[in-house]
Each structure stands twice: as structure tokens, then as C-alpha cells.
Amino acid sequence: MLIGRRSLLTGSVVGGAAALRAATQLGIPGPFRGRVVSVQHPGSIMAGKYQREAVRAMMRKGMMELTGAPSSTEAWRMFFQPGDVVGIKLNPVGQPHLISAPEVFQEIVEGLKEAGVRPRDIVAYERFRTLFLSAGFDKWLPEGVRWSSATEKYAASQLDMDGYDRDQYMEMALVPAKEDPRDPHVRRSYVARFLTKEVNKVVNLGVLKHHQSAGVTIALKNLSHGFVNNVARSHLSTSNNACGMFIPTVVDLPVFRQKVVLNIIDGIKAAYHGGPGGKVVKYLWDHKTLYFATDPVAVDKIGWGVLDDKRAQVGMPPIALAPADDDSLYVRMQPEHVEIAGALGLGESDESKIELKSFRLL
């Protein structure tokens, strides 16, 4: 049964046995292609502060409804088991206004522990060490949980190789004018060794927000621009913008398809314009919703619609048609990366084929 984007359901449509069989097909788009679960809780944020008990209830409900499992523990066990080394991809870019929240991260850790994953085998990750620290992520990691990064700090060239795997990369004929296009190195984006060598599974913890060049940054972009180097070439100027193809081409690499097993999107706070950085403060709203999916394309398509709905409420044009303005400088944003990712088989981008299960907790 196909469920509309605004429908409310109260029950699970997948039996535990079927879900257990499906769970053997981990990776992108995963065992639940086209399925997105949204869980809203009006008490999830109060006076700007996340409420841990509400987040815990949302996490449990979302995982059970995504998988059809009879308990939260069984839901987590469909994806993870003792011996797994699990990376959790954080998002620090909108600091201090809109970044991965400790309450959501800590509940993911609790779920992994329920599945038997040891704290020392859970690793928080952000590409840049300095961004990780300036976001304060290191200050609220649960005891025993490690953290890692691929490189020290943002640089204009982004061609350093210290934390990257020379054997795994995405090649695209897209180079800055100052670089030699005959040099293979500048035509490639190499994958972080963290992903290729250090973990066997990844939880993608994205946030729900607008992005000036990509249109939206939810699940797919959190992966494409968080796990490879040489990404500045994807949006070199306000008119030289290639995010539409760059994002799905990176996520199409086998290592992403194999290791990214779960997407949890924090929409408790969200931003409908001005993203991804400091300008979001003018466009924040309390959406009070978490999203769950194995399919990053489907959850991005739903999130894109949520942002467009909010924009319509305040009299702004949809992302795909919006012109540049003072808080979004690119000539044209490229949310089509979501549909291109669908064409590559990374998930379901046809909204008529997306099953959205929406719940409101009290």
C-alpha cells in the first residue's frame, strides 16, 4: 500500500519475519527501499532545547516502524551485531545554530549498544577535525565512544591525502581553472580511509536544511561531501555549480552502497533557507520530527518536500525555482541531485512510489 506524504498511520505493515529476511540486504538503498518513517513529538524541543525523553520515544518508534520489529532492540539488531565497527556521520556545518544534536546522537548510541555493539566500536565522524571540535561534539560523546576525522581543517585546494584512500575515488572532469586538467589527482575525489578501512557500517545522521548550491542537504549530501576530499570543485562559484551530478556520483561508489545501512535525519530543528551555514538562523523553525530510512533518496525527496511546504507557508518559491538572493547566492540551486541519485538506483525518487509512515507522539 502506498501512503501519501501527509498520511498518518498507527500500525506496522511489515511483519517481523519478513523484516528479518529483508535485513540481510543491508546497504544503499537497503531492505526498505522507498520507505520513510517520520515521527513527530510536540515536546521534543522546548525553549530551544532538545528533550531527551521525547527524543528517546521518537527513536524507538521510528526504528520499530521502519523495520516492523516488535521492539526497539530487535529493530537495531536487524542492522547491527556484536563485532561491528559502526561510524556515525555527524553534521557540524551550520554551527552554532543547526548541527547534529547530542540527544539524537546519544540515543543512536544506546540503540547500537542494545544490538550488542561495544562503545569502543562506535565512532563519531566528521571530515574536518577543527569543525568537529568547534561544534563541541567531543564534549558530549558517551563514555567509551571514539571519534575520528579525515583531515585537519578546511582548505581551498582540498587535495591533501593523509586521511584518504588512494585506491578508492570518484573521477569527474571537473577541475578549478588554476589546476592542470591533465593531472588525474585534481580530477578525483578520494574516499576517507575511515570509510574504506576503519568501519564496516555507517549510520548517516543528517539534518533537515536548505543548501545554496545543492538545494537541500539531508542524507545524500551529508555522505558525498563528508567522506571524500576535493569537494569544493562541485560548487566553484555561484554559477559554476555541479552538485546535481557530483553528489550522486560520489554516493554511487560501491563502498557507500555497501556500508551506509541507516539514515536518521534530525528535523527537530530545520532550516528552509540560508543554508548550510550561519545564515540559517533567520530561517530556523521547530519541525519537531525525526526521519528514518535505509533509502537516502526517498528520505531526501520527502525532506525536500517538507522544506518546499515551509517555504510556501512564508511566501517563498520552491527550491528548484528560487532565484538568488542575499542569503542564497547561487544562480540556480540543484536539488535534482536527489532525482539523479534515484536514476542511478540509489533509492526511490518518485514520490508516488514512496511509502511515508507518519506518526505523532504525545
Image (cartoon, helix red, strand yellow):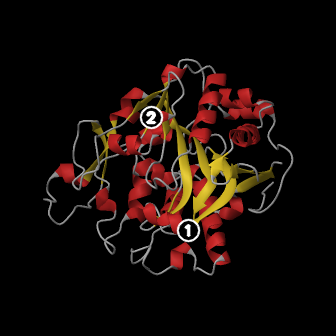
**Which residue is at 56% across, 68% downward?**
283
Residue 351 percent coordinates (x, y): 67, 63
Q: Can residue 298 be seen at all in this image of the molecule?
A: no
Residue 283 - label = 1
Residue 228 - label = none
Helix or strand or loop: what does disc 2 sit on?
A: helix
Left or right? Give the position of 158 relative to 302.
Answer: left
Helix or strand or loop: what does disc 1 sit on?
A: helix
Residue 24 percent coordinates (x, y): 63, 30
Q: Nearer the viewer, residue 158 or 252?
A: 158
Q: Residues within 10 Å of mark 1 (few under 14, many from 20)?
A: some
Q: Nearer the viewer, residue 296 or 24?
A: 296
The residues tagged by marks 2 and 1 sit, at their Cα atoms, a distance apart of 27 Å
**Which residue is at 48% across, 68% downward?**
274
Left or right? Give the position of 213 relative to 179.
Answer: right
Which one is earlier in the sequence, the residue at label 2 or at label 1? 2
Instruction: Kindly identify which residue carries mark 2.
Output: 138
Residue 348 percent coordinates (x, y): 61, 55
Place residue 305 in its image quadrant.
Answer: bottom right
List the single residue furthest toward the right. 10
Place residue 72 in its image quadrant.
Answer: top right
Callout 2 amino acid: Asp
How many numbered discs sit on the rendered protein?
Answer: 2
**Which residue is at 67% across, 26% downward?**
77
Left or right? Give the position of 14 relative to 47.
Answer: right
Image quarter in which the N terminus is found: bottom right
Residue 277 percent coordinates (x, y): 43, 60
Q: Nearer the viewer, residue 283 or 244?
A: 283
Callout 1 amino acid: Tyr
